[in-house]
Amino acid sequence: MSSPHSPIKRLLVANRGEIAVRILHAARELPEKVETFALYTTDDRSHCDLGRPQQAIQIPSATSYLDITHLVDLARKYSIDAVHPGYGFLSESAEFAHRMWHEAGSIVIGPGWENLARTGDKLQAKQLARQCGVPVLEAMAQPTASVDEAGAFARGVGFPVMIKAVDGGGGRGIRLVREEAELDNGIQRAIGESPSRTVFVEKAAVDGFHHVEIQIVGDGTGQVRHLWERDCSAQRRFQKVVECAPALMRDRGLVGRVIESAIKMASHIRYKSLGTFEFLVSELRGEFYFLEINPRLQVEHTITESISGIDLVQTQLLLAQGYTFKDLGLGGETNAFERPPKAFSVQLRLCAEDPSNNFALSIGKVNRFSVPSGHGIRVDTNVNITGSPLIVGSNFDNLLAKIIVTAPTWEATVRKAQRVLADSRIDGVKTNISLLRGIVAHSDFMSGRVDTQWLGLHLESVLQHGENISKTLQTQEGSAAPSQAATQSALPASNLLFRKGDAWSITLEPLSKDGQHADKISHHLLLSRVLRNEFPSSLAAEIEYTTPISRTAIPYRMKLETTSTAASALVSSSHRRGDIKNPQHIVLPLSGKLIEILVTDGEDVAENQVLAFVKQMKMELEVRSPRAGRVKWVYEMEDEEEDVAEGMLLVELEPSVGNVEVRGKL
């Protein structure tokens, strides 16, 4: 292998979670030594423990991953040569790549800011497809913030249509509208999820169409080759759940035409690094349409690695250093469309969420994580049971792990996936493992009859089938180990929410009733800063402690560690927990970040009125009251956004009320 033109000496991984672990591992395996740097927040550093960078840099908050100025300053401070943004966060930001180079002299691993600007914009990407003669769906030529303008175009092309945020991604800012009655609401909700508050409308191709994406690698000189395709059709609300490679279509000629289209577009712009060119493909109709370009590493890159034997992350890093296709073993035949690799791979996204409760985010500490290893099994995760624990919160993505299964045939791959899921156990948070079990056990999945609408149309039956499988597995385990349902039904003690400003009044009452010791002694404890919350095993915090003698708050640093005994604490949190059996209580039905409460004490509440908004990652959920009443008590927010746990009392009404209703605000 020839020497690289511009060796990377210091690499900053500007991401977290399993993808940070993946990049750190790949960088440590490079032919020439690279010093690695990782970022973390106080409550999220498990990826540093598993990835083992040379240096781990603490950043102020979760939003710092999106703070270009802060990241540029870090690159200067630590003399960073290159930044790998992973996916999400700033991975598709042309501004980030431009500023990092011009202000810090650091390259951002990827296609460069010019190609990021051209390919990351969905409308510009569509224009590129037209220039290359690639089929595209009829769409608006310019984005708009006008509901009327978007609606007029939709009516003109006819339903169904897709409403898309120009700067959306990961399922955000996308709405399928099948009829006139859904149109205005769909446009408004898509605009609400767009950072630029602009959308465009395109004719929809949904029924019978597969979501097929082509993995492209370019060296920046015009040389481009493909690494086959992936089928990502098993998705819910445009968010991928299960992906496979290669596609299961029998018409390899049609797949070849799709691959040729991707290569033509990538060659035209002299694409560099990794890129995913996405299409909607109907084998029944023999049609395909260009969808969009993702100019970065994809979450599902793993299955391409499994069938091709190529480390895509290392390929990115080496191309950035000037390695050629010949150096990387990527030369030779690039158009063998009819002969896909002799292996099949599937990726299963294991997430902390409750599919039976509208996929509500499940917040808490992962106490147990057991996924089998062995031939043809790969697990990409940042869950670390022995080191810094993974605590799922509302600030970051809820992906716990990517389970990748590979075998020589599709049938063998599915059977292996069924076995791996059957043998996996996760405790501490609710997960979508039953849904995954239901998908891979379905006959449609085995036969490859899964289009982009399949999971949405069959969700209830697939989930029920998966839950039945899970119950059977629990029965087989017997009483030797607690079932997942049992461990998930109760909120683990380690999930207790402690926050700055929480306060307790502690009363010490001696058991002896004789003499002066019979008096009760009152103390007051206020949390001024939470340093570590792994209660009940450990808790570290800065407190202000007031005794009856001093009557002045004295600052302390408190450390709590597990002992061999457990005692009942005579304390009560300032956050009231609701009683679901109390007809007056409206109890928060999910965990997340409370961003707004819309009612006040004494206010009359109408049936189905929105009471509050809770944010879970990319979604805002409405909390509604199912009947009319008058507010007797309402939780008072202390910050603009607050982390809240399922079961907290939100509102108390004077008349009897039933269960709360949650609806997505998308």
Image (cartoon, grey):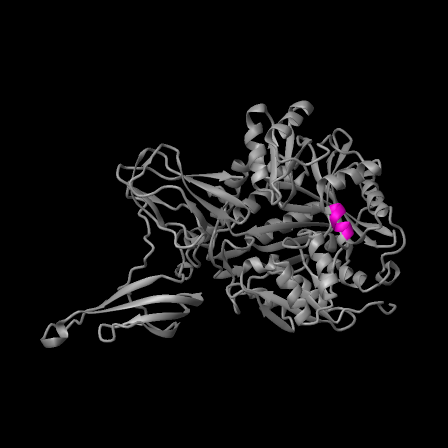
Q: Please, is residue 498 above or below residue 398 in the view?
A: below
Measured as percent of width and height from the top left, residue 51 is found at 63, 67
Identity of the residue furthest to the left in this view: 515
Identity of the residue furthest to the front in this view: 103
Residue range corresponding to the magenta coloring: 114-119
Measured as percent of width and height from the top left, residue 54 is found at 65, 73
Q: How many marks?
A: 0
Residue 25 colored in magenta in the image: no
The answer to which quarter of the image holds residue 541 is bottom left
Left or right relative to 614: residue 401 = right
Looking at the rendered image, the quarter that the C terminus falls into is top right
Task: Name the residue nearer the viewer: 394 or 449.
Answer: 394
Measured as percent of width and height from the top left, residue 296 is found at 72, 53
Looking at the rendered image, the quarter that the N terminus falls into is bottom right
Measured as percent of width and height from the top left, residue 371 is found at 57, 58
Left or right relative to 295: residue 19 = left
The reply to whether residue 338 is visible in this rendering is: no
The residue positioned 68% from the left and 63% from the top of the image is 23
Task: Name the residue nearer the viewer: 22 or 344.
Answer: 22
Residue 116 colored in magenta in the image: yes
Task: Name the residue nearer the viewer: 339 or 91.
Answer: 91
Q: Please, is residue 111 above or below residue 522 in the view?
A: above
The residue positioned 47% from the left and 57% from the top of the image is 427
The reply to whether residue 44 is visible in this rendering is: yes
Identity of the residue furthest to the right in this view: 332
Task: Name the residue nearer the viewer: 153 or 496.
Answer: 153
Q: Please, is residue 371 above or below residue 115 in the view?
A: below
The residue positioned 82% from the left and 47% from the top of the image is 266
